[in-house]
Image (tube, rainbow, N blue to C red):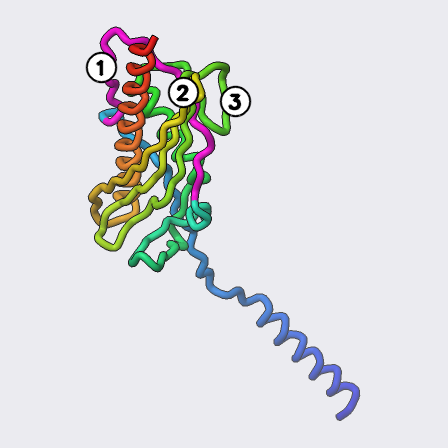
Amino acid sequence: MTNKNTALFALLLLGSFLTQSCILPEANHVEPDFYLLALPDYEQNRTDRSSSPAPTFYLREIELPQYLKDNRLVFRPSIESIEFREYHRWGEPLGDGISRVLGNNLAQRLGTLSYSVFPNRRKNGPQFEIAISILSFEKSSDGKAILDALIEIRDLGGETFRYSFQTSSPMEEGESSEVHALSHCLGKLSQKLTDLILANQSSTILAK
């Protein structure tokens, strides 16, 4: 092969390479959907406290099992297994979302403005300090949103009360309905916290 033919062949190869390199593969990336926990206005019910003073509280950091620290929504098809939804994710750390909803809803129910929620700074002298350990918070195999938690409430005197809490909420198809049902479970938990705090507050007042 002559030098002229060699140069021509090289130019043809170069042209073929440049042509192929300019061809971009079709985009197949799918952006995930993001969700936030929230309670509608009709679930922000204020509890009738008669003439009792509004209690103050501090909600500590929500404790989560390791699998719920992932930002993907979780489905539990059986007791022994879980599934992560790659394209359906939480728009904020789940612990922060639970704190936000519980804190706001509990304050509404108690009728108090004097409260603080992790990660915000703890206000001085709250009457009650609340710790929540979430054990389960996901869609179950029977098509319900489930919440299983442990509650710890400490009063000003240093006495600690511990409780367990389980609830579920029916849901329709779709992730939006699932998030709404999970939020509704948090509404039930905040009502339980309200009842416990008011009961402990009444006991403290009677003991004085």
Quarter of the figure that contains the C terminus: top left
Quarter where residue 207 is shown = top left
- Say which of 83 and 52 sits in front: 52
Residue 60 counted in the magenta span: yes
**Which residue is pictured at 39% across the width and 55% down the height?**
84
**Which residue is pictured at 29% across the width and 49% down the height?**
139
Residue 136: x %, y % from top left: 34, 45
First of labels 2, 3 by sequence position: 3
Residue kind at label 1, given as amino acid type = Asp
Q: Which mark is residue 48?
A: 1
> In the figure, is residue 173 to the left or right of 28?
left
Residue kind at label 3, given as amino acid type = Arg
| Pointer 3 residue | 121
Magenta-highlighted residues: 43-64
Q: Secondary structure at mark 3?
A: loop
Quarter of the figure that contains the N terminus: bottom right
| Pointer 2 residue | 155
Position of residue 98 relative to residue 197, above or below, is: below
Q: Main secondary structure of the magenta part?
A: loop
Q: Secondary structure at mark 1?
A: loop
